[in-house]
Amino acid sequence: MNPNRIEIPSFPGGKRMAVTTSFDDGVIHDRRVVQSFNEWGLKGTFNLNSGPLLRTAMKLSLKKG
């Protein structure tokens, strides 16, 4: 084994390249991205901002209570 050579293992299915995507804050516009990804069979990582989610959850619990 040559210590100066970097070997990169292949991805599943013998693929040699990969593309990664990441979207932050979970804004409403990301829904179009999700829809497109679903149509194309792609995967992505979406990081949701918990602040707006918490506020919505609190409003809903106040309405129920």
Image (tube, grey):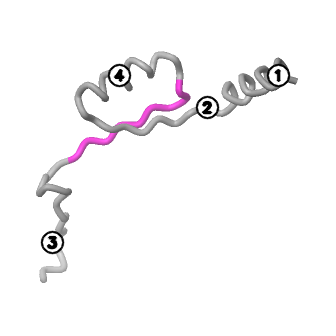
State the image coordinates of residue 14 (x, y, percent, origin top left): 11, 57
- The residue at 52%/36% (across/down) is 47
Q: Is residue 10 left or right of residue 22?
A: left
Give the label on residue 49, or none.
Answer: 2
Pointer 1 and pointer 3: residues touching (CB < 8 Å)?
A: no
Res 4 → quadrant? bottom left
- Mark 3 burial class by Cα count in 10 Å: few <14, some 14-19, many 20+: few
Instruction: Give the residue at mark 1.
Output: 64
The three-letter amino acid code for the residue at tag 3 is Arg
CA–CA distance in space, label 2 to label 3 = 42 Å
Question: Closer to the N terminus: mark 2 or mark 3?
Answer: 3
Which tag, 1 or 4, sits closer to the chain's start?
4
Comes first in the chain, label 3 or label 4: 3
Q: Secondary structure at mark 1?
A: helix
Residue 16 drawn in magenta: no
Kindly identify the residue that appears in the image at 26 percent across and 25 percent down. 39
Quadrant for the C terminus in the image: top right
How much space separates mark 1 and mark 4, taking CA atoms?
32 Å
- Label 4, secondary structure: give it: helix
Q: Nearer the viewer, mark 1 or mark 3?
A: 1
Q: How far is mark 3 from mark 4, CA to CA? A: 41 Å
Q: Which quadrant of the structure image shows residue 52?
A: top right
Q: Quadrant of residue 34?
A: top left
Q: Which residues are magenta?
A: 18-26
| Residue that label 4 marks | 35
Q: Which residue is mark 3?
A: 5
- The amino acid on which the numbered mark 2 sits, given as a three-letter code, is Asn
Determine crowd level at label 1: few under 14, some 14-19, many 20+ residues with C-alpha closer than 10 A: few
Q: Is residue 24 magenta?
A: yes
* Real-space CA distance between mark 1 and mark 2, rounded to the nearest whole angstrom: 24 Å
Disc 2 to disc 4, C-alpha distance? 20 Å
Question: Amino acid under label 1?
Answer: Lys
